[in-house]
Amino acid sequence: MAKYSSKINKIRTFALSLIFVGFFIMYLGIFFRESVILVSIFMFLGLLSIIASTVVYFWIGMLSTKSVQVKCPNCQKPTKILGRVDICMHCNEPLTLDPKLEGLEFNEKYNSKKADS
Ligand SMILES: [Zn+2]
């Protein structure tokens, strides 16, 4: 069985890794000091990655406003649900807003349009 994690946490991890990738690319540029063009390319790519990360962080902020804050029935901590089904950020308990899906095994495909039919 695949291991799921909260969608917002997943995106946050992605944004964080983009920052590291960005700095790493910039760092690699140091090895090409002899060529101004190469250094510029590396710096540009690194900067692009960091900009992408801030965009993703902004996107998380947008998603957070759309998500529903609930109290997890399992660990009693407040968590956010994105879409019809999501996972608790703290204890990975599957959560749903749709009573029809309650009690069913967690499946991310419930979020896709196909599952609505
Ligand atoms: Zn929980």
Image (cartoon, rainbow, N blue to C red):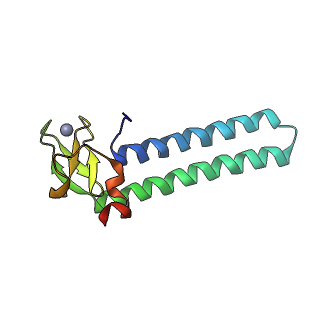
Residue 102 as seen in the image, left or right of residue 16:
left
Residue 5 as seen in the image, left or right of residue 45:
left
Residue drawn where x is 82% and y is 37% of the image:
33
Q: Quadrant of ligand 1?
A: top left
Vertical comparison of 22 with 100: above or below? above
Viewer-side residue, 81 vs 113: 113
Residue 112 rendering spot, x and y as whole percentages: 37, 59
Residue drawn where x is 44% and y is 53% of the image:
57
Residue 110 rendering spot, x and y as whole percentages: 31, 55
State the count of labels: 0
Q: Quadrant of the N terminus?
A: top left
Farthest front residue? 117
Residue 60 as seen in the image, left or right of residue 71:
right
Viewer-side residue, 1 vs 24: 1
Residue drawn where x is 52% and y is 40% of the image:
17
Residue 47 rendering spot, x and y as whole percentages: 64, 50
Farthest bottom residue? 117
Residue drawn where x is 77% and y is 49% of the image:
40
Residue 82 rendering spot, x and y as whole percentages: 30, 55
Q: Quadrant of the C terminus?
A: bottom left
